[in-house]
């Protein structure tokens, strides 16, 4: 996907002021793709190097996350703040540490970079003490195939707490697979991927926290609005494509979503779409052994490539199939009847 135009130019909240949001988004996109020429172009146009997206992620965070040495050097040269904090309290060095980009770590450290989250960024799955979240005060948001979702308060921020059904959590093999998927999710950082925050430890239930997206799912949006206008549809398509591209480009192995549906695409306050729940469907596909229902009950079969339910392939093509169907629906047919 080559178009790096603004996601939602009129509604997006940006930390960097005095620039059009399109310029800032292009800078962020170029930084995350290692496009040095694009970064220079945007900075030359006057885009502020410390501008940030809604999650307060700067171009330096994104370049450090991906290990783009040249872009990191360039941004620092142009005045990027080496210790800017994103919404999760992470600096560019925290991200470079997490992804083991040693050269980038050295560059950032030489410029005074610090990593406030320290070893937390290295652990396979960030554990949060259950006493930090009062589940008795939780507000139920909804329910999916794996369990209920609640709105809770964690460290002064509203976050989503996803509880996993006891039928799954009590099965050691299923629980283990779940934790492995969460450990992978914990490593991911992208503006179009829902941010995983951690697993509650010492809890009698399996509960994990993610960022809370107050506008709900694309499913809710389509149900309410029906077919979208072209501009919105393109902007949504780009958001999903960027998130999916990030998953598919993941090294050393591509991450295949397997359950990309409008219900698994959520919208933040700024109007940006983020993909969630990737990889977790792998567990549901082993439904027979764990005895719980497949997500198809809420509409997943509709978006599922034939090779998945024939259990022939779980490659990138299955996500492309789902993506194409979602695109078709948001641009052509989305109506209350088809959802
Ligand atoms: N991070 C979140 N922020 C806000 N709402 C959320 C979040 N995660 C899930 N939800 C809402 O909670 C409900 C249940 O979500 P969940 O992911 O458990 O199931 P689902 O995706 O709807 O269905 P399935 O599990 O069958 O795919 C949905 O309505 C979704 O919009």
Image: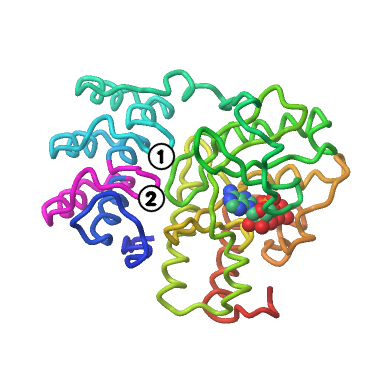
As drawn, the label of residue 77 is none
Element class at badge 1: loop
Q: Which residues are magenta?
A: 32-59
- The correct choice, above or below, for 22 with respect to 96 in the image is below
How far from the left and from the top, in percent, is residue 102?
A: 33, 22
Identify the residue at image location x=80%, y=43%: 286
Residue 54 is marked as: 2
Residue occupying the point 24% across, 35% down: 72
Does residue 330 appear to the left or right of 174 in the view shown?
Answer: left
Estimate the spatial distance between the alpha carbons at disc 2 and disc 1, rounded to whole Å.
8 Å
Q: State the quadrant of the C terminus.
A: bottom right
Badge 2 or badge 1: first in the primary sequence: 2
Q: Is 336 within the magenta?
A: no
Image height of 269 relative to 15, above or below: below
Specify whether tag 1 is near ligand 1 (CB below 8 Å): no
Instruction: State the residue position of label 1.
Output: 87
Identify which residue is drawn at 54% across, 74% down.
330
Q: Is residue 257 visible?
A: no
Tell whether 297 sits left or right of 233.
right
Residue 45's spot in the image, x, y percent?
Answer: 12, 57
Q: For the residue with label 2, is its CB less than 8 Å from the closest atom of ligand 1?
A: no
**Quadrant showing the N terminus:** bottom left
Q: Residues within 10 Å of mark 2 (few under 14, many from 20)?
A: some
Instruction: Please name whichever residue, 331 or 80, is drawn nearer the observer in this view of the structure.
Output: 80
Can residue 172 be seen? Answer: yes
Residues tagged 2 and 1 counted as in contact (Cβ below 8 A): yes
Dot 1, how many residues are within 10 Å of its Cα: few (below 14), some (14-19), or many (20+)? few
Please state the total of marks drawn on the protein image.
Answer: 2
Q: Secondary structure at mark 2?
A: loop
Residue 45 shown in magenta: yes
Residue 59 rendering spot, x and y as whole percentages: 28, 43
Task: Return the residue nearer the eye: 225 or 337.
Answer: 225
């Amino acid at each position: 996907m080559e178009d790096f135009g603004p996601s939602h130019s009129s509604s997006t909240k940006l930390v960097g002021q005095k620039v059009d949001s399109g310029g800032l988004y292009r800078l962020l996109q170029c930084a995350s793709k290692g496009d040095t020429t694009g970064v220079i172009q945007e900075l030359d146009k006057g885009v502020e190097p410390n501008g940030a997206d809604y999650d307060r992620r700067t171009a330096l965070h994104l370049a450090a996350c991906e290990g783009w040495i040249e872009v990191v050097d360039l941004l620092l040269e142009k005045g990027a703040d080496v210790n800017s904090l994103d919404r999760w309290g992470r600096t560019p060095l925290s991200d470079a540490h997490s992804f083991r980009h040693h050269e980038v770590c050295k560059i950032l450290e030489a410029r005074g970079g610090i990593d406030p989250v320290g070893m937390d960024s290295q652990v396979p799955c960030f554990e949060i003490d259950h006493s930090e979240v009062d589940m008795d005060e939780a507000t139920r948001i909804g329910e999916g195939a794996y369990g209920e979702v609640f709105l809770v308060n964690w460290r002064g921020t509203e976050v989503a707490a996803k509880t996993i059904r006891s039928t799954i959590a009590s099965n050691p093999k299923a629980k283990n697979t779940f934790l492995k998927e969460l450990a992978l999710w914990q490593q991911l950082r992208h503006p179009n991927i829902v941010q995983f925050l951690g697993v509650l430890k010492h809890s009698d239930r399996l509960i994990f926290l993610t960022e809370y997206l107050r506008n709900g799912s694309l499913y809710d949006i389509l149900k309410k609005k029906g077919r979208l206008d072209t501009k919105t549809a393109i902007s949504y398509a780009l958001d999903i494509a960027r998130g999916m591209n990030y998953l598919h480009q993941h090294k050393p192995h591509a991450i295949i979503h397997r359950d990309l549906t409008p219900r698994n695409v959520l919208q933040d306050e700024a109007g940006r779409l983020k993909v969630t729940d990737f990889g977790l469907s792998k567990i549901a596909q082993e439904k027979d052994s764990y005895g719980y229902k497949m997500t198809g009950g809420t509409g997943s079969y509709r978006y599922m490539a034939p090779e998945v339910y024939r259990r022939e392939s779980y490659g990138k093509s299955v996500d492309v199939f789902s993506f194409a169907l979602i695109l078709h629906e948001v641009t052509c047919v989305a109506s209350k009847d088809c959802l």
